[in-house]
Image: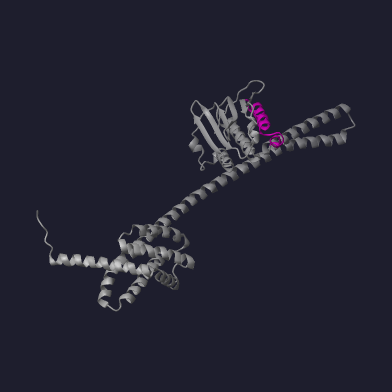
Amino acid sequence: MKRTVATPRMRASHSTAASRAELLRELVAHLRRNRTHLRQEWARRIREARLLTAMSTKEIFSEATCVYDNYVAVLETGHVGALQAYARNLSERIIPRGVDTHEVLGIVLLLRDVLARSLFQKYQGDFELLSRVLDAYEPAANRIANTVGVSFVEERERVIRQQQEAIRQAGVRQRDLRNFSKQILHVLEAERKRLSRELHDEIGQALTAMNTNLGLLRRNGAADAGWLQEKIADSQQLLRQTMNTVHSFARELRPAMLDELGLRPALRSYLKSFAGRTGLRTRFNCTPAVESLGDEQKTVVYRIIQESLTNVAKHAQASHVTVALRERGRKVHVQIKDNGKSFPVEKQLSARRPRRLGLLGMQERLSLINGHLAIESAPGGGTAVRAEIPFTSRARGIGGDDTSHDHANQNGRSSKGGIH
């Protein structure tokens, strides 16, 4: 076996390393003995240099204590892992408060200076020993400063990237919100135009006709009793038609039955009217437990079913539709299912497609009451709109079997539609 012979240079190197290790141990012991005084001096120097101005004096001293202890631990062990972790944690906490890179590097360099001055005071009587102590201390101090600085810069870059991404996403969300707001305004304006047109065409014309009849009656009412009866009957018919139209508008804007009798009667009445108006066969199943929903929840359920049925009548080719409301656990499950043609759900739910505001409106309504919306549409299988609404607070035991009703128009006609 070949033996390695230690040369004078090797022995000197080992001796130097041992001496440096011994000096560092002595240095660590000195820093721990003077921990209280040196921390206070360091915190004072930080305040004098106007660093970490975003932090209070108490906060500065607390963080200075942690950094000091980690600093000494690195001098003792040579391992910087714990210091790196602390530096990242500190950076994460102080970067959002506006602390910049030069402040962090400044406080670390101040600590190095405070400790160097302490070593000078301890060893100033022996300049040769002081020189060896500083030779052992400075490389470790530089490594510590570099570790803290790099950790801070890396964390700051990460925070900046997060902020930039958050700004970008906020811009996207704000753009989508603006688009959605425009869609809402568009639909509201279209609805105002429709109501204005209906009022002008139906109610306006009926009132004009009644006014004409009243004028004729005033001028010629006594001339012919038969003619008089005919005009009065005509005016009464016009008045009934006008009242029915006004009641129809009122039901569309806010069904009084929903407030007076409850959700089930209001839905039953609406589906009966819908079947008679569109020719679609409808089936209605509803659990009594829906009456335990809150007022806002009932309104959302009513509007979702109303919007879904409007879509059925307008856009696809269906002959019948089923509306079912069932209680499952602590939730009400709503389903509106037709046998019409399918459509690409994901595309239609895009906020960038204004003609699909109805579906987006359902999502928005449900989100306000912590509900969820799911839509399934498959070729040959029709479309199903499903909503899930949690009960807020209600007493159980209302129970009872689901009530079912079928509605169809009198002559059995079938119109076609689907949900889009």
Determine which quarter of the picture holds residue 31: bottom left
Determine which quarter of the picture holds residue 196: top right
Front residue of this view, candidates 188 and 349: 349
Front residue of this view, candidates 15 and 220: 15
Query: Would residue 56 appear left or right of 82 to someone viewing this image?
Result: right
Determine which quarter of the picture holds residue 70: bottom left
Q: Is residue 321 found inside the magenta-colored segment of the image?
A: no
Q: Outermost residue toward the bottom? A: 125
Q: Is residue 262 found inside the magenta-colored segment of the image?
A: yes
Q: Outermost residue toward the left? A: 1
Magenta range is 255-279
Say if residue 370 shows up in the picture.
Answer: yes
**Magenta span dominant secondary structure:** helix
Residue 290: percent from the left, percent from the top? 63, 33
In the rendered view, tell whether residue 158 sits above or below residue 186: below
Residue at 62% across / 43% down in the picture?
Answer: 188
Q: Quadrant of the C terminus?
A: top right
Residue 301: percent from the left, percent from the top? 61, 36
Front residue of this view, candidates 337 and 185: 337
Query: Would residue 30 appear left or right of 325 to someone viewing this image?
Result: left
In the rendered view, tell whether residue 289 sits above or below residue 164: above
